[in-house]
Amino acid sequence: MNSSEQPLKTAGYRTQPLVVPGNSCYGHGHGWAQVVSFAPQVHKEERVKVPMRDMVCHVCGKSSQIPAAALSAQCVHCHAYFETTHYVLHSGTRHRILHTLGNVIVPGGVELSHLDVMCSDLVISGKVSGRFCAAQRLELRGRARIKGELSADFLSVPSGASVTVAPSVMVRNAELRGELRGRLIAKGQVHVYSNGRLLGACRAEKLLLDPGAEHEGVLLT
């Protein structure tokens, strides 16, 4: 081999003998010939694992998985379409219909009407009307005023809040550390802490009142 010539690089490849029947390539007579094939073996590339996250459909309530970085998704069960964007709403916003797998915040001082919101976590501190559904957590802060349909898996009214809902709020479980005016309907447990107040009718599987807690209203059956 000439010193200027470079040997053939076969890194990542492996030669395999190719055996074919017929006349020998070496000598006379019938037999088998081994022909060395230098064709590279192509290895299948490993599939890239895409990070996934759980999605709970706001329409049918069934769960599935979507790519964690997806900006939108469609339920594989009922084919409902959702965004995954988080929103902070301000007075004068053009977003009236929001169906997202992200979270929505309505800050204090904001007044909006005729909203249709479906999201994961919903925080309301302002004055709004319309239809609101939080698949996970609903938090009512400050002097929030909500008129219309309001539902969530879990309701939280933090300490110092004095909020009003009309006609009612429907949840699975709730904890009140502040004041809630309006009818509260829960499938599970309602826990009113020592500084909490529930001023309105209540229906719940279990109603817990800590010492100092207050409930003014009838217990619905």
Image (spheres, rainbow, N blue to C red):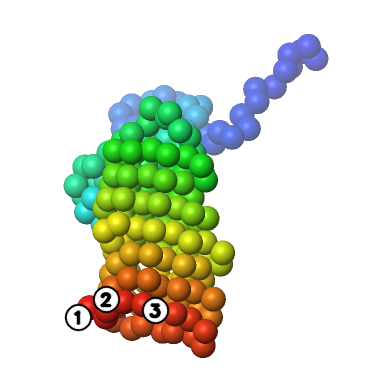
Label 3: few (<14), some (14–19) or many (≥20) C-alpha neighbours in 10 Å: some
Asked whether the beta carbons under mark 2 and mark 1 sit within 8 Å of each other, the answer is: yes
Tell which circle, 2 or 1, labels the residue nearer the N-terminal end. 2
Which image quarter: residue 8?
A: top right
- Percent x, y of residue 195: 54, 76
Give the side of residue 198 with respect to residue 13, left or right.
left
Point out the residue furthest to the right here.
Answer: 3
- For image coordinates 48% across by 35% down, the residue present is 90
**Alpha carbon of mark 2 to alpha carbon of mark 1: how far?**
6 Å
Is disc 3 placed on a helix, strand or loop?
strand
- Nearer-the-camera pick, 88 or 9: 88
**Alpha carbon of mark 2 to alpha carbon of mark 3: how far?**
12 Å
> Does the rendering let one see residue 199?
yes
Q: Label 3 is placed on what type of residue?
A: His
Residue annotated with mark 2 = 203
- For image coordinates 37% across by 71% down, the residue present is 199
Is disc 1 placed on a helix, strand or loop?
loop
- Nearer-the-camera pick, 211 or 152: 211
Foreground tag (1 vs 3): 3
- For image coordinates 33% across by 83% down, the residue present is 206
Residue annotated with mark 1 = 221
Which image quarter: residue 13?
A: top right
Give the side of residue 98 with respect to residue 125, left or right.
left
- Percent x, y of residue 18: 41, 33
Q: Label 2 is placed on what type of residue?
A: Arg
Residue annotated with mark 3 = 215
